[in-house]
Every structure is written in structure tokens, then in C-alpha cells.
Image (cartoon, rainbow, N blue to C red):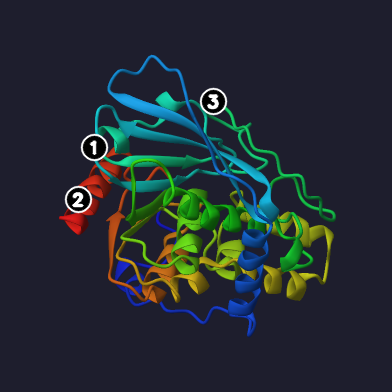
Amino acid sequence: MPRFDLPLSELEQYRPEVAEPDDFDAFWGRTLAESRAAGGEIVVTRAATMLRTIDVWDVTFPGFAGDPVKAWYLRPAGRAESLPVVVEFLGYGGGRGLPVDRLAWSSAGYGHLVMDTRGQGSGWGTGGDTADPHGAGPATPGYLTRGIDDPVDHYYRRVFTDAVRAVDAARLLPGADPDRIAVTGGSQGGGIALAAAGLCSGLVGVMPDVPFLCHFERAVGLTDRDPYHEVVRYLAVHRGAEATVFRTLSYLDGVNFARRADAPALFSTALLDQTCPPSTVFAAYNAYTGPREIDVFPHNDHEGGQAYQLTRQVAWLAERLS
């Protein structure tokens, strides 16, 4: 597969003009205030598993509009002290699955909260458990154009709010150190982690791995892969809707959240990635206002560094917390 995006020397300097709504902060401040005011309880129930070195809890916390959102909370067994917690967000179409799906962070000595993604969980993996009870207008199959006519109705307004409320919940979990919360995720999960970084204060680390949901206008015109291509198909039918579509997406763009994030961050990108093109990742990375590093995989597509990057994240976060 040939390289299709900018050369690395240009990516490192790539700082495009990305539209930012004048009311971006007010929009998100109002959204979060309304959801926190909606109330709801955090329910934490010990889960029976065959694991012997990891303790697991089934968690339900209030997300957007107080809607119940599911998660798994994992901790190394036998540890009584408060531990830092890594909140993980998931890739497109996946759900929280089973506790055995993700054991690395708890095995490395962290609390680990794995947030289910509302309305997803049936595309790959071992399933999801969280409904999205809110409707919207016409959309292309997928999630990216759900509610595309208005940011108030957009699907990712709800998901990003869930992510912030997941961080709120993580700070209240048994055995969690509320002052040592980090966020991570790959692809869609990386984009959600960026949103959480821009909307939450006091995080100790942000680890977006090959993140989706960044620099929409370039991504939509550069790749013919989903999920970004969902927008192309929508616009091919809804001719003349470009201004409305990209206005809505500007409230959800990882570049705009990166401009507001101050926690240390470790990004990654792959130079052959046609799902989340490297220029879209570098647009967010170069806009990021906190301390930042990026790992680049020159010969990989959207798989990126896989276990190599996870190993790097574990070492990087340990260094931040030492």
C-alpha cells in the first residue's frame, strides 16, 4: 500500500485552520451541566468470574441525560490501597464485551474502567450492553451522521458526555485514587479520549491511539473508508448540506478539544492509515496544548502499533506517575 498522505516532515508542522464555533465552550458547558443535573446513581456490583488475579465489578453510571451506561471495573486482586484508574473508550462498533477481553491495565497494577459505547457493541468483539434511547433525523447507516443536522441532536454529543461522566464515576469508585485518572482508547476510543481530555480537568494522562473524529473536513475528502466515508454518502444524497454538516461536526472535532486539553498526552499514528489518516491525527496533536508526544508507525495501516503501543502506554503512564 503506497503512502497517500503528507510526508512526515510536513505532518510534523501541519497546523490547519479548523473551524471552531464561537459558542463551543458554552455548548459543552451547558451539555455537561444538564447531564449532571439529571442525576442518577452509580451502581457497582461484584462480578463473578473465573479470574484469580483480577477483581471485577459490573458498573452502571449516569451518562448523557442521566441515561444508564454500563462499564467494567477491574483491579488487581488483593490490593487494598487506592490505585490510579485508566478509563478506556472503545473502537467503532464494539462494546465493553467480557471482562477477560482487556486485562493489561489491571495486570499492570491499575484500576481499569472500560466504558461501553451507547448503541454500539454489535460490530465486533463480545458485545455491548448500553442502549441509546434518543432518536434523530435521517442518517447514513453507522453513527457519524446520526443527528447531523444539529449538534444538539448528534450522536457523539451523547457519547462524549458519557465519557466525561465516566471520568466522574471513576473518581468515586471503590479503591480509586480520584487525583490519578487517565484516559485512553484506540480509533473511535482515541477520539473519545481526546474529547474527555478537552472537557475534564485534573487528568494525569491522555493516550489517544490512532484517533478517529479529528479534522473532519480533511478526512472526509481524503479517504474512502468508513466511518468518515459515511459523511460522503450522506452528502451524495443530501446535496448542498455541506455547511450544515460541517458546522455540526465542528462541535465534535478532536482538534477543538485538543486546543483545550492540558494533561500530558501520548498520541500514536500510522503513516499508511487510510481509516484515520495521519494528517488528521497530526492536526489534533499539533493543536494539543498540554505536554505531548507522538509515536509514528511508518509501515502500518489502521492497526498502528497494537501491543507495541499498549506496552509503550503502560511504561509511559508509569513514568508520569512515578
Q: Is residue 86 left or right of residue 245?
A: left
Q: Where residue 240 sits: x, y (%)? A: 82, 72
Q: Do the numbered discs 2 and 1 sit on residues whose CB atoms are within 8 Å?
A: yes
Q: Where residue 305 sits: x, y (%)? A: 31, 45
Please tell me which residue is depicted at 54% across the width and 78% down the height of the picture: 18
For marks 1 and 3 on the same chain, the one whose residue lies earlier in the sequence: 1
Return the mark for residue 126: 3
Q: Do the numbered discs 1 and 3 sit on residues whose CB atoms are within 8 Å?
A: no
Please tell me which residue is depicted at 47% across the width and 58% down the height of the picture: 277
> In front: mark 2 or mark 3?
2
How much space separates mark 1 and mark 3, taking CA atoms? Answer: 23 Å
Is residue 300 something that shows in the picture? no
Q: Do the numbered discs 2 and 3 sit on residues whose CB atoms are within 8 Å?
A: no
For marks 2 and 3 on the same chain, the one whose residue lies earlier in the sequence: 3
Element class at badge 1: loop
Count how many numbered circles sit on residues in the image. Answer: 3
For marks 2 and 1 on the same chain, the one whose residue lies earlier in the sequence: 1
Name the amino acid type tagged 2. Answer: Ala
> In front: mark 1 or mark 3?
1
Q: Where residue 146 sits: x, y (%)? A: 74, 54
Residue on which disc 1 sits? 108
For label 1, the crowd category at 10 Å Cα-Cα, with few meaning under 14, some 14 to 19 and many 20 or more, is few
Element class at badge 2: helix
Name the amino acid type tagged 3. Answer: Thr
For label 2, the crowd category at 10 Å Cα-Cα, with few meaning under 14, some 14 to 19 and many 20 or more, is few
Return the mark for residue 318: 2
